[in-house]
Image: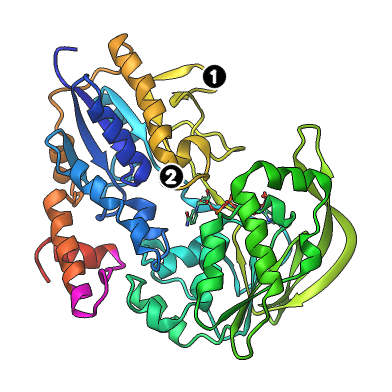
């Protein structure tokens, strides 16, 4: 190609930025338009990473530098499938990269899931992080016991936020509406339910250990839950994160529960069977005890023993994973909840690559891994893109089309880098006044008002 390849990256979260980073590191010249659904960039780093984990958020410094590059243009507040169609992107660009993440949550498919007080953990995360979709969500924290279903890092995050000292939380960028509700919270106990054993837990050790370092928080683990079968023991011995998790859980089991502390309790080998209600509100969870059964591939799956018990609680947070959502005009594998692909090349129903369409991050592999996982993941997709560009396999961009102008002409209030800088400065200044990293604006109209210079 005798001009820079025109590339659209859709989604300004970690996966999108690592795709841009990998593209810019190559010898092939590119001009990248980075689209994002909301005015501010950074995806789950802004809206997902827990507010008391600010150090993780410093990864945005790398993304800021990429945004400032001449080859990159930011188009925030543009939703694919609403403000712009997939067909339009395919006509305006030589290549389109979907970095759209996993926008919804997995369900448990049990009775009582829709009772008042049964919430997706992803919604709770969005709410305390000021994600515009959850600005108006309401979490009634007037109960004393919360059950969290799942043993991943999101389960750990939501449990920690529920028991965290407010002195600490109020120095973070937690949303103001969540801070106000957490001040009134009566929650004293949080129980995390793992359907498999401690050896199979998905959380990582740093996150687990943190419970032992929180003021006013005790951890309750039953020692008998830590007796492992030989297959689970071999798994623990083979992976250092699991070895460390077992060590931490044993320390928790040996420690005593301090009177007056809030308590985080771990229960393993239990599956929720039904969320129980009273007058339409959650009153408990009926769980079944599981045993582990070895599969042909050596993994351990839970199997119900028929033995059940009821845990009384006022809230159930379902933390069993995010899930991708389909976008009109973009291929989607409904079973796996991802954009179907081979080496990051989006494939059609017959499994053959769709020219010029690529995918990175959670939309490519499902909701797994930490932020850094997306770097190698994006680099692999970009390797496919470069191979295709060099081989002449790409779409043909309409060079007369200026997407920024077309979108603005049709009334889309596209937020460019300058607009984001204005919003960023506003939020940071408000944060500085309160000794916090930022005070987030949590609705798009409020954000746009600041960006327009109206506030
Ligand atoms: P996850 O790590 O995949 O954990 C999902 C959990 O839900 C697993 O324990 C899983 O158990 C359980 N589960 C699934 N279906 C279930 C069912 N029907 N009944 C009971 N339990 C069920 O997902 P996540 O916690 O949502 O996290 C998503 C990704 O973001 C992960 O890669 C995570 O590490 C990352 N993350 C990282 C951080 C951090 O680094 N601090 C913070 C938040 C999130 P099985 O194992 O038995 O399937």
Q: Residue 118 lies in what quarter of the image?
A: bottom right
| In this rendering, position of residue 413 left or right of residue 173 | left
Residue at the spot 48% in from the left edge and 41% down from the top edge: 326
Q: Is residue 81 visible?
A: no
How packed mark 1 is, by other alpha carbons closer than 10 Å (few <14, some 14-19, many 20 or more), is few
| In this rendering, position of residue 283 left or right of residue 87 | right
Residue found farthest to the right: 306
Residue at the spot 69% in from the left edge and 47% down from the top edge: 236
Q: Mark 2 points at which residue?
A: 101
Residue found farthest to the bottom: 260
Q: What stretch is highlighted in magenta?
A: 430-443
Nearer the N terminus, badge 2 or badge 1?
2
* Residue 11 to residue 176: above or below: above
Residue 327, given in percent of the width and then of the height, sits at: 43, 40
Q: Mark 1 points at which residue?
A: 351
Pointers 2 and 1 in contact (C-beta within 8 Å): no
Residue at the spot 64% in from the left edge and 90% down from the top edge: 259
Number of marks present in the image shown: 2
Residue 147, given in percent of the width and then of the height, sits at: 65, 71
Quadrant for the C terminus, please.
bottom left
Quadrant for the N terminus, please.
top left
């Amino acid at each position: 190609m005798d001009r820079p390849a025109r590339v659209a990256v859709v989604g300004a979260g970690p996966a999108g930025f690592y795709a841009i980073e990998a593209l810019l590191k190559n010898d092939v010249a590119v001009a990248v338009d980075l689209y994002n659904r909301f005015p501010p960039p950074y995806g789950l780093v802004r809206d997902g990473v827990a507010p008391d984990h600010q150090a993780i958020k410093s990864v945005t410094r790398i993304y800021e530098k990429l945004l400032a590059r001449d080859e990159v243009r930011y188009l925030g507040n543009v939703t694919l499938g609403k403000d712009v169609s997939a067909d339009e992107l395919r006509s305006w660009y030589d290549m389109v990269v979907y970095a759209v993440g996993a926008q919804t949550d997995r369900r448990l498919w049990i009775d009582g899931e829709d009772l008042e007080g049964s919430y997706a953990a992803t919604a709770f995360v969005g709410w305390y992080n000021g994600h515009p979709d959850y600005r108006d969500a309401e979490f009634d924290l007037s109960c004393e016991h919360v059950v969290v279903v799942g043993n991943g890092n999101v389960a750990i995050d939501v449990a920690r936020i529920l028991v965290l000292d407010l002195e600490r939380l109020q120095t973070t960028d937690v949303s103001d509406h969540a801070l106000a509700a957490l001040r009134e919270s009566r929650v004293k106990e949080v129980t995390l339910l793992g359907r498999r054993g401690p050896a199979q837990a998905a959380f990582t050790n740093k996150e687990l250990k943190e419970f032992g370092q929180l003021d006013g928080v005790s951890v309750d683990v039953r020692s008998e839950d830590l007796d492992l079968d030989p297959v689970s023991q071999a798994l623990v011995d083979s992976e250092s994160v699991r070895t460390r998790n077992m060590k931490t859980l044993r320390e928790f089991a040996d420690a005593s529960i301090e009177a007056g502390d809030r308590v985080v309790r771990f229960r393993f080998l239990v599956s929720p069977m039904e969320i129980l209600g009273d007058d339409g509100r959650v009153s408990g969870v009926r769980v079944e005890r599981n045993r582990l059964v070895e599969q042909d591939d050596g993994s351990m799956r839970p199997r119900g023993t028929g033995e059940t018990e009821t845990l009384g609680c006022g809230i159930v947070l379902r933390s069993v994973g995010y899930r991708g959502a389909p976008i009109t005009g973009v291929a989607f594998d409904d079973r796996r909840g991802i954009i179907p692909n081979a080496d990051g090349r989006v494939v059609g129903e017959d499994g053959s690559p769709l020219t010029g369409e690529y995918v990175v991050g959670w939309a490519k592999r499902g909701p797994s891994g930490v932020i850094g996982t997306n770097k190698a993941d994006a680099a692999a997709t970009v390797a496919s893109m470069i191979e295709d560009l060099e081989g002449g396999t790409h779409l043909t961009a309409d060079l007369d089309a200026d997407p920024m102008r077309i979108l603005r002409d049709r009334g889309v209030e596209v937020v460019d880098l300058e607009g984001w800088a204005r919003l960023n400065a506003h939020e940071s200044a408000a944060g500085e006044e309160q000794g916090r990293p930022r005070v987030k604006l949590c609705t798009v109209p409020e954000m746009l008002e600041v960006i327009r210079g109206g506030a």
